[in-house]
Image: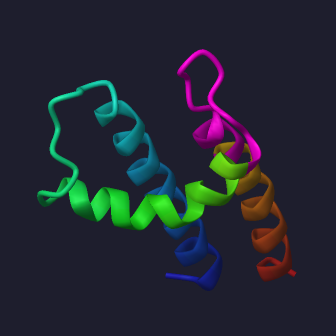
Amino acid sequence: MSLYQAIANLFQLFQLILIVRILLTWFPNINWWNQPFKFLRDVTDPVLEPFRKLIPPIGGLDLSPLVLFFVLNILEKVVLGFVNI
């Protein structure tokens, strides 16, 4: 596996984890302190928190994951562009 493919896979894995986290927030009875939910929270919260501080919820809807996806896509293209040189 090339370095390019490994980095691309890491970005895809994180985006998948983030999607699972977002979908699980629709279920209010989930205890985020139990595994595997704690793992999802521990992995995604440090990245989401700066965006949550910048973008307040609108009508109870947290838009920080949407902004994070946008930033991750740009970051992925930049990083993979440098690796592909």
Magenta stretch: includes residue 15: no
Considering only vertical position in the picture, is 57 above or below 17? above
Q: Is residue 82 left or right of residue 48?
A: right
Considering only vertical position in the picture, is 24 above or below 3? above
Considering only vertical position in the picture, is 20 above or below 36? above
> What residue is shown at x 57% (from left), y 72% (from top)?
5
Q: Nearer the viewer, residue 17 or 32?
A: 32
- Name the main secondary structure of what is drawn in magenta: loop
Provide the residue span drawn in magenta: 54-68
Provide residue 11's location: percent of width, then percent of height: 56, 63
> What residue is shown at x 59% (from left), y 66% (from top)?
8
* Direction top: furthest residue: 59
Q: Nearer the viewer, residue 61 or 9?
A: 61
Q: Is residue 41 left or right of residue 12?
A: left
> What residue is shown at x 29% (from left), y 35% (from top)?
24
Provide residue 36's location: percent of width, then percent of height: 16, 58
Provide residue 9's location: percent of width, then percent of height: 50, 66
Q: Quadrant of residue 63?
A: top right
Q: Is residue 43 left or right of residue 12?
A: left
How many marks the image carries: the answer is 0
Q: How is the image coloured?
A: rainbow
Provide residue 31's location: percent of width, then percent of height: 15, 45
